Image (cartoon, rainbow, N blue to C red):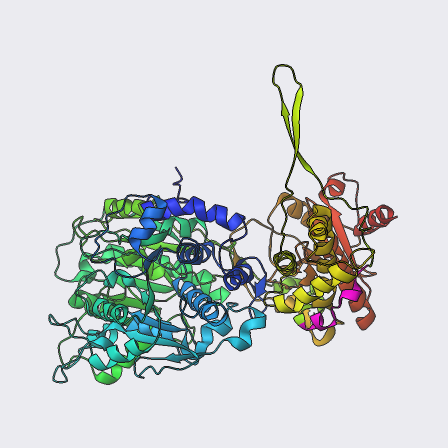
């Protein structure tokens, strides 16, 4: 039975869910214009990364930033008490802990917390810049729970996260028209933050707040995780005071289940910022936002659990391999005591390796040992497997002085950060569960837990599964990735119960069935004669506000309405006797209208800006709207201050004409249809890299691929038709992983989008771009027109005949077609 993970069982997120859904569908009302622009940019407009792969923010990321904005801007809840009161929910509040604005986000491991943090920064930064610098902030302190988390957040020049602002360049956080306005200094804990007019992102390990005893020497775990907090913690006065001098800081706690205790030093540091009026708010992010007693934080406003993350296919799907009749081996050596589990893990890892390595990924085996002695023993045992020899990374939870050289410590951290790379030598990790925070690795595919579990310990699924939840191919949303967990003899009931808490129904499999072999799609070297080449056009349609310079009120039609013949509607109140039906009285009610010309012009202008997606252009558009209304709309010049004129202007038909006229004219100016440039390179089917597919596939003859994925029966049947059509020489299924042919077009709402046709087909006479269509939607005409334009330009530039063909399901199902030419004849008849 499938669990319902849509609505959280937690009181605040559960209550917020429906309100935010209504708010979203209603167009994000009661927020600043800056916030509305960001929400539209992030979640309505289309994006692609530098490599041409389409990009969309995940639903959980969208919900997280929406929950924050709704609570902070719409509800304006500056305390937990205020939030609970507005939502009318029952939550125990300790007034001693409810001192400042504080929200927590419960987000499953692998669901993209770092992306949300970057969204938060962009949202607050631009609102501080464009709206209210007292309500929002340009100064951000990101607190990490240990050095591995800090490494992940900071990144480096090769793999930047916040390093050099890299994450803001890597993903589409900032609307294109605002990129030049975004200036932040990113500083690490080794630097002291300095106040400046630019924004500041200060990344710090929480221990930077602590005065350390220089006489104490680090052990390896302290270097990686940081030292264990001393009993008597005192904030570093210098750093605390410097932060207090910054204005209105927004504090972000990553892996925030470490902030539960008021006695912790970073809590005291945040409290100090609050006391100095230097705190905007505190945001806590964690998959397990619980205190030491297992109680969830009371200030959780958003709950995106592991069950939802699995359902949304943004993390791997955990599959638990059951071990039956495992003998109890009495041995002091972990490798002998757990030999069955280890061998099973290696066997599953080898199955995964055989498939993944062909697709360019290196799967990693992750074994969690009981203690350091067991870890060493297991690692030594793994050396006996020829494909793992000298390729095992062992990480301990503690070492006594002298057992490992200082020079090896940085190597261990580096290896942990880079283990996904094919160039990294390690294929297996043996750990004592020390990397449960900050372990930002994607290639762990098999997990073998060997630790002693007990119901009292309440091991959470994130601590067991979290090492391998992150997807190898996060951009391939139709690919279901798997995480194999080898069952511990004491593990069955515990993980079943723990997963249930996270909205996941545990599934147990036999060793033979646990790994579902994914379909590997690749070039068939025996079919190279079916290669297809596509010219690459650069440009075509662009969105640029520079065209607004040509907008003039004289561009529009003149004398649209006759002033004297346009009468406002009268709203009449009639009183009728219910028994006699006799009219007793009539009264003309006041017509509701904007009786202030400034309010009217502002209302019309905002509607135009929203429809044409040109935020920040109010002061450019409003005067043109005003001049148009005064001079051109009617058959005579009018005065806006005239009450009669305002009543006429408030008529729905008049408002509609003004807004639609401006939308049409502005779209002509800002959506630029430029002549594309023909690249000197060709997109060749023979250069498609191997990729995996979880959808249905079919083997067909006239394509260079070994198999072709399809998403519906129409596509499947059309593939079969193409394979048998007597005039088809070759074809290729077009998608981002194959030919990546994209046609830019403008949708019905004015957004610039990319359209990906289904097929490219080669015939003796021509090349065809073919789209199969089950349902003709509102944007089909725009897509067709731009694809025809693409084929026309390509034909002219290459001297090769290209055409576009749309095959509707209703025509295809009629049958009787033996060639692709038959559909061209049908299309020609339908056109005429």
Q: How far across and down, in percent of the image, does residue 616 sit?
A: 59, 67
Residue drawn at 28 percent across, 56 percent down: 289
Residue drawn at 76 percent across, 40 percent down: 815
Q: How far across and down, in percent of the image, does residue 653 sit?
A: 73, 47
Q: Which of 825 and 185 is in front in this view?
A: 185
Residue 543 in view in this figure:
yes
Say left or right for 477 vs 319.
right
Question: Considering only vertical position in the picture, is 44 above or below 578?
Answer: below
Q: Nearer the viewer, residue 64 or 145?
A: 64
Quadrant location of the N terminus? top left
In the image, residue 778 lies in the stretch drawn in magenta: no
Question: Considering only vertical position in the picture, is 219 above or below 600?
Answer: below
Examine the residues drawn in magenta and state their main secondary structure: helix
In the image, residue 549 lies in the stretch drawn in magenta: yes
Residue drawn at 60 percent across, 55 percent down: 707
Residue 383 in view in this figure:
no
Q: How far across and down, in percent of the image, does residue 626 sit?
A: 70, 62
Say left or right for 616 vs 728.
left
Q: In which quarter of the image is residue 614?
A: bottom right
Q: Quadrant of residue 794?
A: bottom right
Question: Considering only vertical position in the picture, is 592 above or below 452?
Answer: above
Q: How far across and down, in percent of the image, does residue 446 sit?
A: 35, 59
Q: Nearer the viewer, residue 533 or 391?
A: 533
The magenta segment: 546-557
């Amino acid at each position: 039975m499938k669990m319902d993970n849509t609505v959280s069982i937690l009181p605040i997120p559960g209550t917020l869910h429906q309100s935010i859904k209504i708010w979203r569908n209603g167009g994000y009302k009661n927020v600043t214009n800056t916030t509305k622009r960001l929400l539209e940019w992030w979640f309505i407009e289309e994006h692609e990364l530098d490599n041409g792969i389409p990009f969309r923010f995940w639903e959980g990321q969208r919900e997280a930033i929406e929950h924050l904005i709704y609570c902070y801007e719409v509800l304006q809840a500056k305390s937990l008490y205020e939030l609970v009161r507005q939502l009318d929910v029952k939550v125990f509040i300790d007034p001693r802990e409810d001192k400042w604005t504080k929200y927590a986000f419960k987000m499953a491991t692998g669901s993209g917390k770092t992306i949300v943090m970057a969204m938060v920064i962009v949202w607050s930064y631009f609102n501080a810049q464009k709206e209210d610098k007292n309500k929002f902030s340009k100064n951000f302190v990101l607190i990490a729970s240990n050095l591995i988390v800090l490494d992940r957040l900071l990144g480096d020049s090769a793999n930047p996260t916040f390093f050099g602002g890299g994450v803001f360049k890597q993903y589409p956080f900032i609307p294109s028209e605002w990129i030049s306005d975004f200036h932040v200094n990113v500083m690490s804990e080794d630097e002291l933050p300095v106040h400046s007019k630019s924004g500041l992102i200060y990344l710090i390990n929480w221990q930077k707040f602590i005065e350390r005893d220089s006489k104490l020497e680090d052990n390896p775990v302290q270097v990686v995780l940081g030292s264990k907090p001393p009993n008597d913690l005192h904030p570093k006065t210098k750093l605390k005071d410097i932060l207090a001098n910054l204005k209105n800081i927004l504090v972000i706690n990553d892996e925030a289940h470490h902030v539960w205790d008021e006695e912790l030093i970073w809590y005291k540091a945040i409290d100090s910022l609050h006391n100095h009026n230097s705190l905007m708010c505190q945001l806590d992010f964690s998959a397990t936002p619980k205190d030491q007693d297992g109680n969830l934080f009371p200030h959780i406003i958003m709950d995106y659990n592991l069950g939802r993350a699995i359902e949304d296919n943004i993390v791997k799907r955990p599959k638990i391999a059951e071990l039956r009749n495992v003998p109890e081996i009495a041995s002091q050596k972990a490798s002998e005591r757990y030999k069955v589990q280890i061998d099973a893990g290696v066997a599953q890892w080898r199955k995964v390796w055989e498939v993944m390595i062909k697709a360019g990924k290196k799967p990693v085996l992750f074994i969690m040992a009981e203690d350091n002695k067991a870890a060493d023993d297991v690692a030594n045992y793994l050396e006996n497997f020829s494909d793992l020899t000298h390729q095992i990374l062992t990480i301990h939870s503690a070492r006594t002085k002298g057992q490992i050289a200082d020079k090896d410590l940085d190597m261990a951290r580096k290896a942990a950060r880079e283990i996904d790379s094919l160039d990294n030598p390690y294929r297996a990790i043996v750990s004592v569960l020390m990397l449960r925070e900050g372990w930002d690795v994607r290639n762990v595919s098999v997990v073998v837990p060997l630790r002693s579990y007990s119901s009292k310990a309440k091991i959470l699924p994130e601590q067991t599964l979290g090492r391998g939840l992150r997807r190898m191919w996060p951009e391939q949303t139709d690919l279901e990735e798997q995480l194999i967990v080898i069952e511990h003899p004491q593990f069955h009931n515990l993980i079943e119960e723990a997963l249930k808490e996270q909205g996941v129904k545990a599934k147990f499999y036999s060793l033979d069935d646990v790994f579902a072999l994914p379909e590997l799609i690749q070039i068939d070297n025996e079919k190279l004669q079916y290669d297809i080449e596509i010219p690459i056009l650069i440009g075509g349609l662009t969105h640029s506000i520079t065209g607004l310079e040509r907008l003039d009120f004289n561009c529009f039609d003149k004398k649209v309405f006759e002033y004297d013949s346009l009468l406002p509607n009268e709203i009449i109140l009639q009183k009728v006797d219910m028994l006699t039906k006799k009219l007793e009285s009539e009264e003309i009610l006041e017509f509701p209208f904007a009786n202030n010309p400034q309010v009217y012009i502002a209302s019309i202008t905002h509607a135009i800006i929203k429809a044409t997606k040109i935020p920040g252009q109010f002061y450019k558009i409003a005067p043109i709207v005003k001049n148009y209304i005064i001079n051109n709309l009617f058959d005579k010049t009018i005065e806006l201050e005239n009450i009669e004129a305002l009543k006429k202007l408030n008529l729905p038909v008049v408002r509609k004409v003004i807004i639609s006229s401006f939308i049409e004219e502005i779209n002509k100016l800002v959506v630029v249809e430029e002549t594309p440039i023909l690249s000197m390179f060709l997109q060749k089917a023979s250069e498609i890299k191997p990729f995996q597919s979880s959808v249905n596939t079919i083997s067909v003859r006239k394509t260079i691929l070994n198999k072709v994925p399809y998403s519906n029966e129409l596509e499947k049947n059309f593939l079969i038709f193409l394979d048998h059509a007597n005039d088809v020489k070759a074809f290729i299924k077009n998608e981002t992983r194959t030919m990546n042919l994209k046609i830019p077009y403008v949708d019905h709402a004015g957004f610039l989008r990319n359209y990906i046709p289904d097929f490219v087909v080669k015939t003796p006479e021509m090349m065809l771009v073919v789209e199969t269509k089950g349902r003709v939607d509102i944007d089909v005409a725009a897509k067709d027109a731009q694809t025809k334009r693409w084929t026309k330009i390509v034909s002219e530039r290459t001297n090769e005949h290209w055409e576009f063909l749309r095959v509707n399901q209703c025509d295809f199902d009629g049958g009787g077609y033996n060639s692709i030419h038959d559909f061209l004849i049908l299309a020609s008849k339908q056109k005429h």
